[in-house]
Amino acid sequence: MSKSQNPLLKIWQSLPFTGKAGPLVTVIELTGVIGVSGPGRKGLSHQKLQKVIEGAFKPSELDAVALAINSPGGSPVQSRLIFSEIRRLAKEKDVPVLAFIEDVGASGGYILAIAGDEIYADESSVVGSIGVISGGFGFQEAISRLGIERRVYTAGENKTMLDPFKPEDPADVARLRDILEDLHAQFIALVKSRRPGKIADDPEIFSGAVWTGLKAREKGLVDGTAQLDDFIRARFGKDVRIKRMSPEGGSLLKRLLSSNDAQAPSLIDADALVDAAERKALWARFGL
């Protein structure tokens, strides 16, 4: 009797836990402001995401990796490190990467998006902000009114550049603008290298402006409007397996114990409060 005629084999193959499994797509959840990891700091960083990214590309039978992006940006260096890690493994494993922008994929969040071979957004997503920003405060008049004397000792004439307790120096501002222009040029070059022939001939694209997903598609910043789960099932079939991976994973108890929200107010330091304010300010730029 041949294998094809064996009734026991047919019964075994019909069982739900046997036979070839459906296509597998892993999803890396990239939600939050991008910045350096540390005590009291939430959000995204290369250090926090490295194992998550490696895990997403690890399965031997992998059909695609998807990026679920919801980020207003942050550190340009951390954005590039995360981008490079994804591209390195995509090339090494020869696996396509699909990026999906949710509420926001702006500035460094858009750098994460161009790690995808294809980029999709919701029609109402906020996309773009291809620019560089630096902000701060000046306290020189405040400390003067309080009768506080500023004492700083340096070796190197530019070590106090943009000191918030000193009057603004035009030479310092010029140096900062040079740095911002250099970073902006790097950002533009990266976008063009990842979207060849797709970006519209419109200088406003690199002005730091943002658009809805619909307008971003017209500008060539995204390939279309779609939502992650629906798109993946349409492309890979209804039996596709979607495995989500997040840097905030782990047991509920572990997350509660490591959460800043679980700390008593007296334990929240100034750095954590400043970090929270900076994150709020970044989201607020996009109405969130």
Image (cartoon, rainbow, N blue to C red):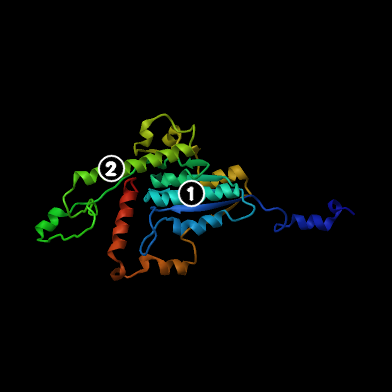
Which residue is located at x 35 percent, y 42 percent?
Answer: 182
Which residue is located at x 48 percent, y 33 percent?
Answer: 198
Taking depth in this image into account, of 18 and 157 the one nearest to the observer is 157
Q: CA distance from mark 2 to mark 1?
A: 26 Å
Q: Badge 2: how crowded within 10 Å, few (<14), some, or many (20+)?
A: some
Q: Amino acid at mark 1?
A: Ser
Q: Is residue 147 visible?
A: yes
- Residue 48 badge: none
Q: Quadrant of the N terminus?
A: bottom right
Which residue is located at x 12 percent, y 60 percent?
Answer: 149
Picture quadrant where residue 190 is located = top left
- Residue 84 badge: 1
Taking depth in this image into account, of 191 and 159 the one nearest to the observer is 159
The answer to whether residue 55 is above or below residue 194 is: below
Residue at image mark 2 = 177
Which residue is located at x 49 percent, y 37 percent?
Answer: 224
The answer to whether residue 24 is above or below residue 150 is: above
Q: Earlier in the sequence, mark 2 or mark 1?
A: 1
Q: Point out residue 112 in the picture as x, y percentages from the top left corner.
A: 45, 47
Q: Point out residue 92 in the picture as x, y percentages from the top left corner.
A: 58, 49
Horizontal relation, residue 19 to residue 85: left or right? right
Task: Kindly indicate whether the residue at mark 1 contacts the one at mark 2 (C-beta within 8 angstroms).
Answer: no
Q: Point out residue 179 in the picture as x, y percentages from the top left corner.
A: 31, 44
